[in-house]
Amino acid sequence: MKKFGVASVCSGIEAVSDGLKKCSKCLVTKTLAEFHSQPSGKMGRHSYCSECACSIQRSVRNTKPRPYSTEQKRRWHIRSRYKASVEQIEALYVQQGGKCGICKKPLRRYHIDHDHRTKIIRGLLCHRCNVRIGGWEDQGFREAALRWIERGLS
């Protein structure tokens, strides 16, 4: 309510001057630091305090069904990244006898090894071999690694 063009105490201006804001969910007045930033919101902050916003997100996350199953995500990942089907990868696994293409140890989990330039799949590797071969594709790294090894041998 305004009297003579001056804002009354009920307008909330006193809260702004103190760096405080009232949460529209729990109705508790809190410091601006207790609100997530939101450029389009009043005072550049979200209307709910961080605690209320997190509790809302938690309840939505727990009640809302997942749009994709783990298997659907796996199929999408293989198809989009490697332009292959899950069946092709499983056939490659069988072809390799369930073993790493380099060290020949049994594969518990596998990595799809591919040429980063041509995107052609070379085979399936264990994590250890996949990490090791990653550096060897880069000639500069390969030369630096060989210099490093030779330095230690002399």
Image (cartoon, grey):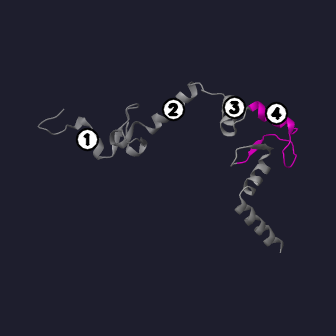
The residue identified by callout 1 is 13
Mark 3 or 1: in front is: 3
Secondary structure under the numbered disc 2 in the rendered image: helix
**Residue topped by disc 4:** 91
Q: Which mark is residue 75?
A: 3
Secondary structure at badge 4 equals helix
| Nearest to the observer: residue 78 or residue 57 | 78
The answer to if 114 sits in the magenta stretch is yes
Q: Nearer the viewer, residue 63 or 2?
A: 63
Does the residue at mark 3 contact the one at mark 1 (Cβ under 8 Å)? no
Q: Is residue 140 above or below residue 53?
A: below
C-alpha span from label 2 to label 1: 30 Å
Which mark sits nearer the N-terminus, 2 or 3?
2
Nearer to us: label 2 or label 1: 2
Label 4 – label 3 distance at C-alpha: 14 Å
The residue where tag 2 is placed is 57
Q: Is residue 100 magenta?
A: yes
Q: The disc labelled 4 sits on which kind of residue?
A: Ala
Foreground of the two, 69 or 64: 69
Q: Which residues are magenta?
A: 86-115
Mark 2 nearby-residue class (10 Å; few <14, some 14–19, many ≥20)? few
The outermost residue toward the front is 118
Helix, strand or loop at label 3? It is helix
Mark 2–mark 4 distance (CA, rounded to whole Å): 41 Å
